[in-house]
Image (tube, helix red, strand yellow):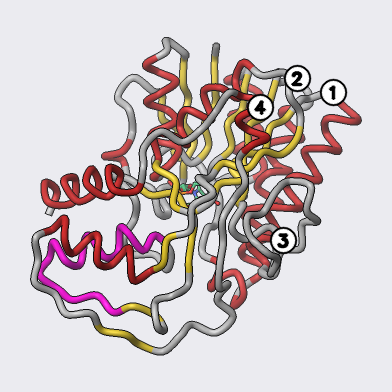
C-alpha cells in the first residue's frame, strides 16, 4: 500500500516507517524537520520537506501523492510549551490535521491512523485509564489531540474515512530527542552518557507508563489491517517512578552518578498508566519489550551514539 507518514523524520514515526517499509509498503514521509532529523529517514522512503500548517503545500502533496493510508504523527509535542503558547499548539495539531484531511477526503484515503496521547487525555483520574473514561485533558496539547480525534470522527461520519487513534503512554527508545521537556529516559541516558548528572524533578515518586517504541510501531502495523474505528490505548499498564527510571539508567550505564532532586514542575500529573485490554482484544496487540530490556536497548544506543 502507499502510505503517507507525517512526522516520519521524528522519533516514533521513523520506527513506524521502518516497519511499514520492511513489510513492503511504499512510504512517503512529510516532515518540516523542526524536531525531526534527516538521519532518521529510511532511505527507501520518499521524503518531502514540508510543514503541515502550510495549507496549500500539504494539500498539493496529498493530492499529488494520493496515498491509500495517512499515518499522522507530525505534531507539536511539548505539553509545557502548549500551556505557554496554545495557539502554536492548535495551529500544528488542529489546523495541521484539518489541512491534511480536507485534501484526504477528496481522494478519498482508505484510512487515517493518528498518534494521540493516553497520558495527557484523561485528566486526574484513578489509574489505569481506559477508553471508556471521559476524556478530560488538562493541557492545550491534550485538548488539541482530543480535538483531532473528534475531527477524525467527523470525517468518518461525513466522508466515511475510517480512522484509528492510538493513544500512546510515554514512548521511549532509540532516536528519541533528548532535548525536549519529555522523554525522561532519553534525557537521563544522553546526559549520563555525556558524563553529566541529570536532576530529577521533585521527589521522583511520580509514575508514568513507559512503552517501548518497537511495540508502538507494531500497533501501527496492526492498525493497517483492522476494521476498527475509534480510539485505542497503547501502553503497558505498569507504573514506573522517575526515581526507578534514574536508578535503572544509571545501573545500565555503569555510571557513578549521585541522585539530585530539583523543584517539582507545577501542574505535573502524579500518576499515569493505560489499560491496553481494548487494543489487545481488537488488534491482538500487547507490549512485548519489558522495561528492563527496553532501558538496556536505549542505553546501548546512547552509548554508541555519544
Ligand atoms: N513520545 C511520546 O511519548 C508520545 C506519547 C504520546 C503521543 N505522542 C505523539 O506521537 C507523535 C510523534 O512524537 P515523537 O515523540 O516521535 O516526537 P518527534 O518530535 O520526534 O516527532 C514529531 C515529528 O513531527 C515533525 N513535525 C512537527 N511539527 C511539524 C509540522 N508542523 N509540519 C511537519 N512536520 C512537523 C517533527 O520535525 C518531527 O520529526 C506526536 O504526534 C506525539 O504527539 C508521542
Q: Secondary structure at mark 1?
A: loop
- Tag 2 near tag 1, CB within 8 Å: yes
In the picture of the structure, the residue carrying the numbered disc 3 is 143
In the picture of the structure, the residue carrying the numbered disc 2 is 108
Q: Residue furthest right?
A: 158
* Label 1 to label 4: alpha-carbon separation: 24 Å
Q: Are there few (<14), some (14-19), or many (20+) residues within 10 Å of tag 4? A: few
* Label 2 to label 1: alpha-carbon separation: 9 Å
Magenta stretch: includes residue 192: yes
Q: Residue at x 41, y 89 (%)?
A: 263
* Label 1 to label 3: alpha-carbon separation: 24 Å
Q: Nearer the viewer, mark 3 or mark 2?
A: 3
Q: What range of the chain is rendered magenta? A: 183-199
> Residue 62 location in percent, x, y?
63, 27
* Label 4 to label 2: alpha-carbon separation: 28 Å
Q: Give the position of the C terminus as an image quadrant.
A: bottom left
> Residue 28 location in percent, x, y?
48, 25
Q: Residue at x 78, y 53 (%)?
A: 133
In the picture of the structure, the residue carrying the numbered disc 4 is 281
Between discs 3 and 4, the one toward the N terminus: 3
Between discs 2 and 1, the one toward the N terminus: 2
Along the line of sight, which residue is nearer the eye, 136 or 85?
136
Q: Quadrant of residue 126?
A: bottom right
Amino acid at each position: 500500500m502507499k502510505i503517507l507518514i507525517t512526522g516520519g523524520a521524528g522519533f516514533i514515526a521513523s520506527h513506524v516507517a521502518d516497519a511499514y517499509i520492511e513489510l513492503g509498503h511504499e512510504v512517503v514521509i512529510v516532515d518540516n524537520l523542526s524536531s525531526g532529523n534527516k538521519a532518521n529517514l529510511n532511505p527507501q522512503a520518499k521524503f518531502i520537506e514540508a510543514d503541515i500548517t502550510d495549507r496549500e503545500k500539504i494539500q498539493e502533496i496529498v493530492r499529488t501523492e494520493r496515498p491509500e493510508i495517512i499515518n499522522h504523527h507530525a505534531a507539536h509535542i511539548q505539553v509545557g510549551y502548549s500551556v505557554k503558547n496554545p495557539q502554536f499548539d492548535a495551529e500544528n495539531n488542529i489546523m495541521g490535521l484539518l489541512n491534511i484531511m480536507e485534501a484526504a477526503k477528496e481522494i478519498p484515503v482508505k484510512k487515517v491512523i493518528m498518534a494521540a496521547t493516553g497520558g495527557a487525555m484523561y485528566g486526574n483520574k484513578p489509574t489505569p485509564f481506559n477508553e471508556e473514561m471521559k476524556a478530560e485533558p488538562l493541557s492545550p496539547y491534550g485538548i488539541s489531540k482530543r480535538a483531532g480525534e473528534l475531527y477524525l470522527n467527523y470525517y468518518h461520519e461525513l466522508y466515511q474515512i475510517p480512522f484509528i487513534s492510538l493513544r500512546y503512554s510515554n514512548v521511549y527508545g532509540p532516536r528519541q530527542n533528548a532535548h525536549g521537556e519529555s522523554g525522561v529516559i532519553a534525557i537521563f541516558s544522553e546526559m549520563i552518557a555525556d558524563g553529566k548528572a541529570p536532576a530529577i524533578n521533585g521527589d521522583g515518586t511520580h509514575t508514568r507508563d513507559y512503552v517501548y517504541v518497537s511495540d508502538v510501531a507494531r500497533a501501527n502495523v496492526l492498525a493497517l489491517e483492522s476494521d476498527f474505528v475509534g480510539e485505542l490505548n497503547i501502553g503497558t499498564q505498569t507504573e514506573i517512578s522517575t526515581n526507578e527510571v534514574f536508578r535503572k539508567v544509571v545501573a545500565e550505564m555503569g555510571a557513578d552518578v549521585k541522585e539530585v532532586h530539583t523543584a517539582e514542575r507545577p501542574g505535573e500529573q502524579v500518576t499515569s498508566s493505560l489499560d491496553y485490554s481494548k487494543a489487545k482484544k481488537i488488534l491482538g496487540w500487547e507490549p512485548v519489550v519489558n522495561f528492563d530490556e527496553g532501558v538496556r536497548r536505549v542505553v546501548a544506543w546512547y552509548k554508541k551514539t555519544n
